[in-house]
Amino acid sequence: MIQIGWVEKWTLRFVVVALVFLAMSGFEGILMRTQLVSPETFEAIESVVMQVRPGGGEHSTAELFYGMLTVHPIVGIYGFV
């Protein structure tokens, strides 16, 4: 078996991290599209998130959707840079 050098190791690490970020971005996209089609699907998950989230105030489903919409491109961009 051939030994790989440090450049190849770093390249492989970056590729793996980029693929992980791509998968996360795709999963977020699926969640956002599902929430647009049927908002009642994630009511149970949202109630758990409200209990865990620090700080007061009840957030609406629209606020949660737009919060995810804000983070989605950031996850996608940093996964490919």
Image (spheres, rainbow, N blue to C red):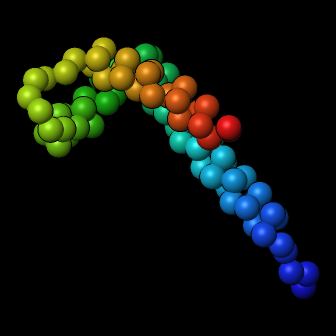
Q: Nearer the viewer, residue 32 or 3?
A: 3
- Left or right: where does residue 21 sit relative to residue 3? left
**Above-or-below relation of 66 to 44:** above
Mark yes or no: residue 30 visible. Answer: no
Which residue is painted at 81% across and 63% down in the image?
7
Which residue is painted at 49% across and 22% down in the image?
33
Which residue is painted at 83% across and 72% down in the image?
5
Q: Nearer the viewer, residue 78 or 49?
A: 78
Q: Position of residue 74 (x, y in %)?
A: 52, 30
The N terminus, quarter of image: bottom right
Mark yes or no: residue 41 visible. Answer: yes
Q: Residue furthest bottom?
A: 1
Q: How many marks?
A: 0
Q: Residue furthest right?
A: 2
Q: Nearer the viewer, residue 7 or 45?
A: 7
Q: Residue furthest front?
A: 6
- Left or right: where does residue 46 sit relative to residue 4? left
The C terminus, quarter of image: top right
Q: Looking at the rendering, which quadrant does residue 42 occupy?
A: top left
Q: Position of residue 63 (x, y in %)?
A: 29, 17
Q: Residue furthest left?
A: 56
Q: Position of residue 66 (x, y in %)?
A: 37, 17
Q: Looking at the rendering, which quadrant does residue 39 occupy?
A: top left
Q: Nearer the viewer, residue 48 or 69?
A: 69
Q: Position of residue 79 (x, y in %)?
A: 62, 40
**Above-or-below relation of 80 to 6:** above
Which residue is painted at 78% across and 69% down in the image?
6
- Left or right: where does residue 63 sit relative to residue 70? left
